[in-house]
Amino acid sequence: MPIPFNFRLTEFPEEAEVLRIEVREFLSTALADVPKETRAETWYGADEGFSRKVGERGWIGLSWPTEFGGAGRSAMERYVMLEEMLTAGAPVGAHWIADRQSGPLIIRYGTPEQQEKILPGILKGKTYFCIGMSEPDSGSDLAALRTKAEKKGDKYIVNGTKLWTSGAQRCQYMIALFRTSKEEDRHGGLSQFIVDLTLPGVTIRPIIDLAGRHHFNEVVFEDVEVSETMLVGKEGNGWNQVTAELALERSGPERYLSSYALLQELVKEFSERNDNEGVTEIGRQMAHLTTLRQMSVSVAGMLNDGDNPALEASVVKDLGAVFEQDLPNIANRLIELEPDNKGNDFQKYLAILTQISPSFSLRGGTREILRGIIARGLGLR
Amino acid sequence: MSNETSQLLSDTAEKLFSDHVTKNCIEEAEKGIWPDTLWNEVVDNGLNLILVPEDLGGVGGTWMNAGILFKASGRYQAPIPLAENIVAAFILSLGNISSPEGALLTLLEGAFVSENGLVSGTSPRVPFSSNSSHGVLLFEENNDLKVGLVELDKNNIEENNNIALESRGNIVLNNIKPLESNIIDCDPELIHKIGALMRSNQMAGALESILEQSVRYANERIQFGRPIGKFQAIQQDLAVLSTHVAASSVAADYASFCMDKGDPDFAIAVAKSRIDDAISIGAGIAHQVHGAIGFTYEHGLHFATRRLWSWRSEFGTGSEWSKIIGQKAISNGAEKFWPSITSGNLDI
């Protein structure tokens, strides 16, 4: 059995490097007032004012086709813009999901009416999306989901509960996966909808995470009437549409840069100390980071070329999460400072990242699920 | 680099190694028997001259091309100094020197000095010292850096092996007149750096081998009534191994790629450091999956793992290269940390 991965190296085109300089210049002023706590959260940190500024620069929908209002630039350019935002700690969380996956989904499967109604707001950094997949009894086993959308006239009546919905409290819409019919095949009978979260019968309840942040939500649907015009793609094709979406979700720079701020703070701490173990460890982590970046860029290149690097994307996400989760522990081992929200920058970053790091190998596909996908690729399942 | 050249090289190496690098061939080599047929095939195909420019009788390939051969030699654990000969011939070519017909070259890394045209110095743990006819070295003469070719004298070699039973003797040159030498404009650490690049690629190849062997074994070995590869515990471990194999391959490619671009220092250090970690995790998993049989001399897994455990220490350990990266990153300061990653260069 030959090795089933093919990570061919990809180089950024020249225009991407030009864009990199523009983004760095923009961030040097746009981030001046953003507090460290928000910066540490990268794409979980949200600032609607910042999102609108990014929209004004034309950097939301950067790689969408121009006919949909996008900038029509390559996925490689978008990658550079994202990695610069993330490493600078830009609070991109508000528009992140809409830009990364909801917009592209609507471009690919949406009706012209949906596209006209929704895409302009996303591009301006004003319309935000959350993802309605997980449910109380449907986590890793996504196909077990039970929230029903029953056709009645020109509407669907939705009943059920979505859970762990990130950022729902500030989103206008959810891309939701509902069960539209009972099928023998458990992957059949699922459909995607755009749900306006202000509709009667929708209740959004906060779930406070262990770090005390309001990030997650429970979203309850009670006889919510969703117009049939809000169905995305074909009824019953939801599973296929969702799995295509996941490849976009699993290999981007956000999958290994979550703890980047802490690594940079470590470098700062060590510039004031004389510590051989720390020096070697920083070099080691830099080697991991550089390699992960080449792998992730390689996947971006394959996506840009129209290939389907689903397996490679899982490899990047798994390794990326290990890297991101190791960093708070390494920092703790090397520097004798306690995580402290009121301490110095290093202590603040350590406090936040230590607490949120367990989520890195849960969100977007758990470690065990990803490794199962890889094992299948290896011919073991 | 054209894809066609790469494919051709890859096919040639695969065919040649799968035909000739048998288990018996490696075992014989470990007893000190030189694999004559294998080496002659390699030379007949010109693989050892992949990096030598065409006007010096070589193939004029790229480092990405050479990487394919380095990796293949590691994947098959070919008991010959193909990688060393590719690099040695390349370094000679920088000084406009052709490798002598029929010579078996090795790399002499160390501090060599020349006085009145006679070179002295010591090179520890020289790859394939007992098999090689000539050594390639860099030395200083009147403040010039020169590349030289010397004939090796068995009397000046203190033989030793690495734990993969590849010959690694210490070579002492005492007032030796090089057969040829020339002033060269290159990094004085060139042998050390390219050595690390070459070993990184070979290790990436050997890691692919242990993954392939482990997956095959897990699909064949039956316990509790089914192949052990059907158990999730084994699947998860092999998935982890494969992620490190993939990372190693990318790290090695990135180093070759940067070598072609003429700015390899950072990428080489990254590769040697990253792959070192992959070995710590990967070799352990491969042996765990193989159980007791993989711990025997009879089973071939150790041909790859013993090489990995040897090669990781050669041309700078993972820690040494990590330290070099860390020192530069810290002296550059936090503000330059990310820009140095995006530019692939720590001297920014």
Image (tube, coloured by chain):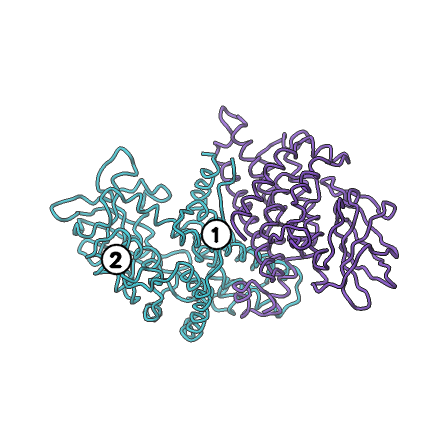
Chain colours: A cyan, B purple
Q: Report the residue at 46% width, 66% height from top.
A: A17
Residue A96 picture location, percent across and down: 35, 60
Q: Is residue A121 above or below residue A195?
A: below
Q: Report the residue at 17% width, 47% height from top.
A: A157
Can you identify the residue that label 2 sits on? A173
- The subunit letter for the residue under badge 1 reads A
Q: Report the residue at 88% width, 55% height from top.
A: B174
Crowding near pointer 2: few (<14 within 10 Å), some, many (20+)?
many
The numbered dot on residue A25 is none
Determine whether, in the image, residue B109 is placed left or right of residue B76. right
Dot 1 falls on a residue whose secondary structure is helix
The image quadrant where one finds the C terminus of chain B is bottom right
> At label 1, which amino acid type do we have?
Ala
Return the residue nearer the eye: A235 or B82.
B82
Residue situated furthest left in the rendering:
A153
Determine whether, in the image, residue A221 is placed left or right of residue B260. left
Residue B328 sits in which quadrant?
A: bottom right
Q: CA distance from mark 1 to mark 2?
A: 28 Å
Residue B229 picture location, percent across and down: 50, 32
The numbered dot on residue A321 is 1
Residue situated furthest top in the rendering:
B225
Dot 2 falls on a residue whose secondary structure is strand
> At label 2, which amino acid type do we have?
Tyr
Return the residue nearer the eye: B274 or B74.
B74
Residue B279 appears in the picture as rendered: no
Determine whether, in the image, residue A50 is placed left or right of residue B295. left
Residue A257 picture location, percent across and down: 47, 59
- The subunit letter for the residue under badge 2 reads A
Residue B181 picture location, percent across and down: 79, 59
Return the residue nearer the eye: B60 or B68.
B60
